[in-house]
Image (cartoon, rainbow, N blue to C red):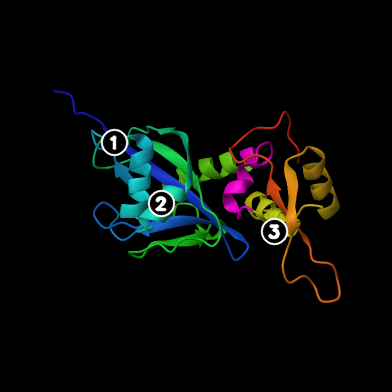
Amino acid sequence: MLERPVLAVDVVLFGLQAGALAVLLAPRREAPFRGALALPGAALAPDESLLAAARRALAGKAGLPAAAAREVHLEQLGAFDGLYRDPRGRTVSVVHLGLCREPLPAPGGGAAFHPVREVAPGALPFDHGQVLEAALVRLRGKLRYTNIAAFLLPETFRLEELQRVYEAVLDRRLNRANFRTKLLRIGLLARAGVARGGLQGGRPPHLYRFTRGDLEAEERDFL
């Protein structure tokens, strides 16, 4: 009789922490790799959707408050089906890419957000290092032609704050003038008032918002 494979979900949840891109990792509570930091995940229950399982993993494995887990932006990254990715047996994971806005929610049970650049190659168990890299590549790619940055920021923000998001994700500096000109030219942003408490003796900076609330692609790469 053939062994039935397990269908699971794992979540790569990104957020900004002290100006750097960070990923949520939680210590494993059971073997294998007990105590190792890993991406939160869970086996799919017979009566739940993949999205519900991903949110359950965030609440159960990473200790996110239920309300915070519901508000996280989640989208499917892809299926990871390496034959020996889990030493316990055949497991296929449908990985979700997640984004959360500042301020980051406070996880529990030893889980925490860790700067992506500080996660050493080979440090994560299973194939989670490969999964993290794939999620990072996807996020960087979508940042260049969609409004996905909206899910890492408050509803309104200064252009300086938006540029810091792009620089944190892409891990490189951007030309300030070119960045602003391109995003305003294509209509991705709209003014939404002025910030309180501007610089002394100067005009308060403008606040902006994305013109569309849902994730939407542009016709071309705008960076």
Q: At numbered mark 1, what does the secondary structure look like: helix, strand or loop? A: loop
213 relative position to 218: left or right:
left
Q: CA distance from mark 1 to mark 2?
A: 16 Å
Q: CA distance from mark 1 to mark 3?
A: 37 Å
Q: Tell which circle, 3 or 2, labels the residue nearer the N-terminal end.
A: 2
Three-letter residue code for mark 3: Glu
Q: At numbered mark 2, what does the secondary structure look like: helix, strand or loop? A: helix
Q: Tell which circle, 1 or 2, labels the residue nearer the N-terminal end.
A: 1
Instruction: Locate the C terminus and report the quarter of the image it occupies.
Output: top right
Q: At numbered mark 3, what does the secondary structure look like: helix, strand or loop? A: helix
Name the residue tied to disc 1. Answer: 48
Name the residue tied to disc 2. Answer: 69
Q: Which residues are magenta?
A: 141-155
Q: Residue at x 42, y 56 (%)?
A: 25
49 relative position to 186: left or right:
left
Residue 172 seen: no
Q: Residue at x 82, y 40 (%)?
A: 185
Disc 2 crowd, CA 10 A, few/some/many (<14, 14-19, 20+): many
Name the residue tied to disc 3. Answer: 161
67 is higher (above) or lower (below) than 106 = above
Residue 133 seen: yes
Three-letter residue code for mark 2: Ala
Disc 3 crowd, CA 10 A, few/some/many (<14, 14-19, 20+): some
Q: Residue 7: x, y in percent? A: 30, 34
157 is higher (above) or lower (below) than 190 = below
45 relative position to 94: left or right:
left
Three-letter residue code for mark 1: Glu
Q: How many marks?
A: 3
